[in-house]
């Protein structure tokens, strides 16, 4: 809790100095700097960390993603030069499980991991020693189709929020009230930045956009169009457009105030899949569909895979089945998490959509 103690180097101290000297900072800057600090120094995944992701729950998740990629690659004519790309690979667990299945089926792509955190790169090197690392997508190869995956990547990218006030649309900023960070409306008019359909919205209406996620999807779409390939983006999010803030902070598996511990809790927002699909199509990709994680994993045969694993290790049956339920049950990850499939125009449809 270094920031509460007010350590000079804590991000909270940096933000306090910045706001005291220059006024409120944008929520986008607050969230971007917080997550950069959060991920740079530690591995937040798993039971002892702050949150657990699908690939860390069960090997079945990565295996089924690997099968999906293998299936679409085969039906695209099994091109020889092909690249597995993962955005924000965490501990490398999904990549390891997916690549094991892919290699068994005769698909041995080069492995490219896009990761900003030094601590997580070290973890990934243990799981996928033959990978190459990239700070962003710019340096990814251009000489063959991409088989791209991102699980819980887009939700970590910083959002911008606009709020309708009595005086018109304003950007939502982060200011100081005593020692505490609080959301405040900027005093600069922002009506010009808001789509026309929203101009007459009622007071307090809040809209959220994620320019970073849109930029990533645009880059994926352009590469699929230019190089061929397919992509799966998996995240918690919504398929229909909505209003309201979805910003949340998780620390030690518990929701906390997003403004209480900058840099020490994981800040995420729900992904706006409807807008992401529009951006992908505008960038030249084909939108294969967006479905719930539960429907996707069921369609790919998770029940059959769980039964196989239970037959091999009967004493672990109840753990295998409860992990499977965690991934697909509506009340757990099955409904809130969505899977969006994209492909090059010249590539076939994907399974499960
Ligand atoms: N996909 C993994 C980890 C999800 S956590 C899993 O499912 O377990 C988010 C991941 O995205 C981490 O690896 C984090 O370091 C990475 N990340 C977050 N913001 C990033 C950014 N701006 N650039 C590159 N990587 C980022």
Image (tube, rainbow, N blue to C red):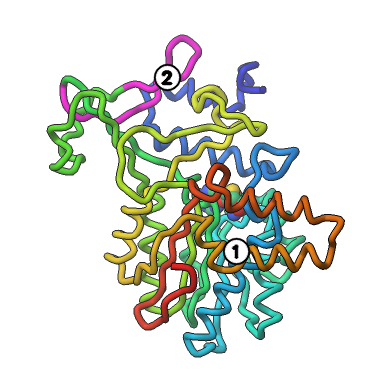
In space, the residues marked 2 and 1 are separated at their CA atoms by 36 Å
**Magenta run includes residue 171:** yes
Choose between 243 and 109: the one closer to the eye.
243
Location of the C terminus by quadrant is: bottom left
Per the image, the residue denoted by label 2 is: 182
Choose between 339 and 259: the one closer to the eye.
339
Placement of 280 over or under 271, stated as above or below? below
Asked if ligand 1 lies within 8 A of label 2, the reply is no
Placement of 328 over or under 148, stated as above or below? above
Q: Residue at x 48, y 46 (%)?
A: 336
**Crowd tier of the residue under label 2, counting other residues whose Cα lies within 10 Å: few below 14, some 14–19, many 20 or above:** some
Residue 89 in the image: x percent, y percent?
Answer: 61, 57
> Going from the N terminus, do you reach mark 2 or mark 1 first?
1
Q: What is the residue that sits farthest to the right in this orientation?
A: 315
Residue 281 in the image: x percent, y percent?
Answer: 30, 66
In the picture, measured across the screen, residue 174 lies left or right of residue 118, that is left
Residue 312 in the image: x percent, y percent?
Answer: 83, 67
Label 1: state its secondary structure: strand
Q: Residue at x 41, y 60 (%)?
A: 290
Q: Residue at x 40, y 25 (%)?
A: 174
Per the image, the residue denoted by label 1 is: 113
**Crowd tier of the residue under label 1, counting other residues whose Cα lies within 10 Å: few below 14, some 14–19, many 20 or above:** many
Give residue 175's mark.
Answer: none
């Amino acid at each position: 809790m270094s920031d509460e103690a007010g350590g000079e180097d804590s991000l909270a101290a940096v933000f306090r100095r910045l706001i005291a000297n220059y006024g409120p900072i944008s929520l986008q800057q607050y969230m971007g700097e917080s997550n950069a600090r959060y991920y740079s120094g530690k591995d937040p995944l798993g039971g002892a960390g702050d949150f657990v992701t699908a690939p860390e729950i069960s090997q079945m998740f990565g295996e089924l993603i690997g099968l999906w990629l293998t299936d679409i690659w085969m039906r695209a004519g099994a091109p020889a030069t092909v690249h597995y790309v993962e955005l924000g690979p965490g501990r490398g667990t999904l990549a390891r499980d997916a690549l094991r299945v892919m290699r068994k089926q005769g698909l041995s792509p080069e492995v490219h991991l896009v990761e900003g955190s030094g601590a997580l790169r070290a973890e990934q090197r243990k799981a996928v020693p033959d990978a190459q690392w990239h700070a962003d997508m710019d340096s990814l190869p251009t000489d063959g189709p991409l088989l791209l995956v991102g699980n819980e990547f887009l939700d970590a990218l910083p959002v911008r929020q606009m709020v309708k006030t009595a005086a018109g649309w304003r950007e939502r900023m982060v200011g100081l009230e005593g020692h505490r960070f609080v959301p405040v409306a900027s005093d600069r008019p922002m009506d010009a930045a808001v789509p026309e359909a929203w101009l007459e919205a009622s007071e307090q209406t809040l809209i959220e956009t994620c320019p970073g996620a849109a930029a990533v999807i645009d880059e994926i779409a352009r590469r699929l169009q230019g190089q061929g390939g397919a992509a799966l983006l998996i995240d918690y999010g919504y398929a229909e457009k909505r209003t309201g803030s979805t910003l949340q902070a998780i620390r030690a598996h518990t929701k906390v105030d997003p403004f209480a511990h900058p840099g020490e809790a994981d800040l995420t927002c729900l992904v706006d899949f409807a807008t992401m699909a529009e951006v992908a199509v505008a960038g030249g990709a084909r939108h294969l569909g967006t479905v719930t994680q539960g429907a996707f994993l069921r369609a790919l045969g998770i029940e059959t895979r769980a039964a196989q694993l239970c037959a091999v290790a009967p004493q672990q049956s109840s753990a295998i089945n409860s992990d499977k339920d965690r991934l697909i049950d509506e009340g757990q990850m099955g409904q809130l998490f969505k899977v969006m499939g994209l492909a090059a125009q010249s590539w076939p449809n994907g399974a499960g959509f």
